[in-house]
Image (cartoon, rainbow, N blue to C red):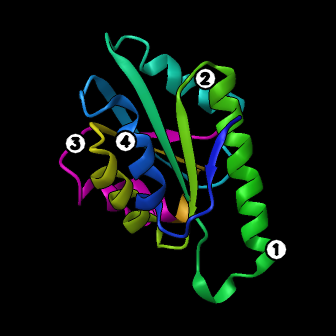
């Protein structure tokens, strides 16, 4: 069964996942910020990128709810449904994965996942945003300014 945690704080969801190795540290953890639903194509591209690693991989997906003033109960249900599909797509590729929908803003939610899981890399999966690209303040730019680990920005096709 795919793991989808419904905790409002991503760190709580990933603390349990982090303990699955017994603290041996033999996992390569990747924190993944998913703007919407992870497509089959993006899931495949991401897992292919990490096939060259000579270690066990573990993906930690986080999807922020967005603007607090626009949140409704239906919005959370939709976000959880999309996260569930994303987790299932990764599992279909035999990728160990956990996922959470966060009430935090995107950068904060991702940074919490990175800290909690001690992720070695970050992947941000977004749609193409022309305005954000022009202003150089898209999510990838914001995260890149705040992390010291490698970051990959996958743009949905």
The tag earlier along the polypeptide, 2 or 3, is 2
* Quadrant of residue 135 within the rendered picture: bottom left
Q: Nearer the viewer, mark 3 or mark 4?
A: 4
In the image, taking residue 118 as reference, residue 100 lies left or right, namely: right
Name the secondary structure under disc 1: helix
Front disc: 4 or 1: 4
Q: Sequence order check: which comes first, mark 4 or mark 1? A: 4
C-alpha span from label 2 to label 3: 22 Å
Label 3: state its secondary structure. Answer: loop
Quarter that holds the N terminus: top right
Location of residue 47 in the rendering, given as x and y in whole percent from the top left corner: 51, 22
Residue 116's tag is none
Q: Which residues are magenta?
A: 132-157
Q: Please tell me which of labels 2 and 1 falls first in the chain.
A: 2
Of labels 4 and 2, earlier in sequence is 4
- Secondary structure category for the residue under label 2: helix
| Residue 76 sits above or below residue 27 on the image | below
Residue matched to label 1: 74
Residue furthest front in the image: 22
Find the distance from the CA under tag 3 to the CA under tag 4: 18 Å
Using residue 2 as the reference point, say whether residue 134 is left or right of it.
left
**Circle 3 is placed at which residue position?**
149
Q: Which residue is mark 2?
A: 44
On screen, residue 155 above or below 71: above
Q: CA distance from mark 2 to mark 1?
A: 29 Å
Could you tell me if the residues under marks 4 and 2 are in contact, i.e. CB atoms within 8 Å? no
Q: Nearer the viewer, mark 2 or mark 1?
A: 1
Residue 18: assigned label: 4
Quadrant housing residue 152 = top left
Task: Please state which of residues 155 and 104 is positioned toward the viewer in this rendering.
Answer: 104
């Amino acid at each position: 069964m795919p793991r989808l945690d419904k905790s409002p704080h991503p760190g709580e969801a990933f603390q349990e996942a982090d303990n699955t190795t017994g603290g041996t540290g033999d996992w390569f953890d990747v924190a993944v910020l998913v703007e919407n639903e992870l497509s089959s194509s993006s899931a495949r591209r991401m897992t292919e990128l990490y096939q060259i690693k000579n270690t066990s991989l573990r993906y930690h997906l986080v999807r922020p709810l967005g603007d607090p003033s626009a949140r409704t109960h239906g919005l959370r249900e939709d976000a959880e449904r999309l996260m569930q599909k994303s987790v299932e797509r990764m599992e279909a590729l035999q990728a160990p994965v956990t996922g959470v929908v966060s009430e935090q803003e995107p950068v904060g939610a991702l940074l919490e996942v990175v800290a909690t899981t001690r992720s070695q890399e970050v992947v941000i999966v977004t749609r193409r945003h022309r305005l954000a690209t022009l202003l150089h303040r898209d999510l990838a730019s914001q995260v890149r300014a705040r992390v010291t680990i490698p970051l990959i920005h996958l743009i949905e096709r």
